[in-house]
Image (cartoon, grey):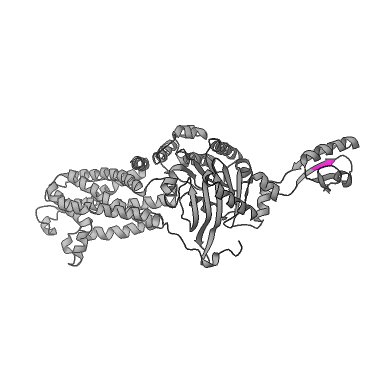
Amino acid sequence: MTSINAMFKASLLSIIRDKQLIGGAIAFPVIFLLAFAAFDLSLTGTDLGTGGGIDYFTFVVPGLLAMTAMEFSVSWTSASYARLNETKVLRRLDATPIRHSSFLTGQVASRILVGTVQTIAVIIVAMVLGADFAGNPVLLVGLSILAAAVFMPLGFAIGAKASGVESASVLSGMTVLPVVFLSGAFFPTSGLPDWLEPVVEVLPMAPLMEAMRTVAISGGGITDIAGNTGLVAAWIPVTFGLAVFAMRRPRTRVAAPAAAEPAMS
Amino acid sequence: MHQTMTTTSTLEHTVTDDAVTVRGLFKYYPHPDGGTFAAVDGIDIAAHRGEVLGILGPNGAGKTTTLEIIEGLTAADGGSVSVLGLDPFVEPNEVQKRIGIQLQSSAYFEFLRLEELLNLFGDLYPKRLDPVGLLARVGLEDKRKALVGELSGGQAQRFAIVAALVNDPDVVFLDEPTTGLDPQARRNLWDVIDGLSEEGRTVILTTHYMEEAETLADRVAVIDHGRIVDLDTPTSLIDRHGSETNVRFVTDRPTSTADLERLPGVRSAANGPAGHTSHTLDVSATDVAVPALFNWAAQASVSITDLTIHRPTLEDVFLNITGRRLRD
């Protein structure tokens, strides 16, 4: 517990003291939101097949939140971990008795805190720009936290397997962007071919999106999103386990080469 | 080879007194030309409790790999290791709780201050020392609010050493702790390392600096090509592998080498580059030969100037054992 707490503090201080990082982390989804808001938003829910009298902007905000939760979580953490590896900070931590799970928990918890501030900023800016959430925005913040808890370990897993910071960035983009688009962040999933829909439904992104839209658009409460929330939460042990597995260094013994036996003794 | 065998048999009898024992250690790495090569090729070594054990060897000799296996950072491909009675391959975390590790190149979270880093590291162990006291030990107490990136090379290296002491370790591993430092910083670190040994900690240290090994180490292992070539106290290594001690001096008038060779404790005498007024004596006993030389000079009314005594250093031993061929 002490080591989780120590890692949490170390990670949080590292983030907060990097002004560019903390500023960029909060500005990133807000700027994306402003880019959407620059378009003509007079499309209606009927045009989009979502029913009801909601505008496209309100339709997009939950998608944007979900996308931020995934894209940002994965690309940020994978690059961070790859950099800690490249700069040999991890090698130094390897020389201490900290467990990978404690490292991961502390790191993820500190980053979730930053992600929460980020989500609140997006929601406030969206409401100022005219988004009209039917449900409680606090639930949207809660769902974003849940999503970060699922996706950040995935980023650590990618960062652990990447050869460096550059490949970590490429690999996380390759993992995240297709999933985001397929999961209906920007377009309803009803447009997908029949065979692809069940695949997408199993991934955490689609239930997350559905839960967010249930809150934002249909005004759903906790009971209405319990099922989807459970589906998303079920992924936490999966990605967490994946990350811890990826972080472990190989400990296999190499067999002695036949030719390497010393001739003299 | 003879010495290695002696060490092995000693090890079998005194295993409980040793902080670290290594038997028949092997580690293979892929060879650039295909196949594998033995980076560690059957190393047997033991570090007695409370001693400073120096490990000397050319670049690529297997020093760092050996240390990293003992520290539980790298898995060996053969052999056994025991650190304070524990196997670092089986329970690296238990071993790491009781050892301190300074890596050849260490990095820390770049936005954390020194005191915060020591607090972070301290929190990773069951037992910990006070950060300010640790920093004071290496004269960094004024830098507690500094980032590692703001330190000079010597300061960063001193920090790396106290970061290895944060858990009050029984065994401390220092991998080339003074490489790249200026003479002042190096001597400051020697004092720190001496202090560790006075506190009863076992220190295992690799270095390229013979003077460092000679000053700090109780025993020195010379490693080459992944094997221990010799292991002994610095003095014994010098006695066994060094060339003879020379006494060089200049006389105010020509002197015959025959007169000098008759002096007790002198094996042979030769004239130096300046002809019959400069001399080099090979001596078997400096404490006999030098007084005898001055007695003779007084009787013969010869005045002696510029007298120097050249004792072989560990560097001579090292080059005699590992050869002069360039490595790496």
x, y percent for residue A16: 35, 41
Res. A57 visible in picture: no
x, y percent for residue B71: 48, 49
Does residue A10 appear to the left or right of B293 in the view shown?
A: left
**The quarter of the displayed image where residue A48 is located:** bottom left
Q: Main secondary structure of the magenta part?
A: strand
Does residue A51 appear to the left or right of B195 in the view shown?
A: left
Does residue A27 appear to the left or right of A126 in the view shown?
A: right
For this rendering, which residue is in front, B46 or B262? B46
User: Which residue ends up furthest to the right in the rendered image?
Assistant: B300
Q: How many marks?
A: 0
Where are the magenta residues, as a range? B248-253
x, y percent for residue B184: 60, 38
Does the magenta-highlighted stretch encompass residue B251? yes
For this rendering, which residue is in front, A242 or B1? B1
Res. A121 visible in picture: yes
**The quarter of the displayed image where residue B130 is located:** top left
x, y percent for residue B99: 47, 43
Determine the residue positioned at 52% across, 58% down: B26
User: Which residue ends up furthest to the left in the rendered image?
Assistant: A52
Note whether A124 is above or below B322 in the view shown: above
User: Which residue ends up furthest to the front in the rendered image?
Assistant: B13
Q: Quadrant of the N terminus of chain A?
A: top left
**The quarter of the displayed image where residue B254 is located:** top right
Q: Quadrant of the C terminus of chain A?
A: bottom right
Does the magenta-highlighted stretch encompass residue B263? no
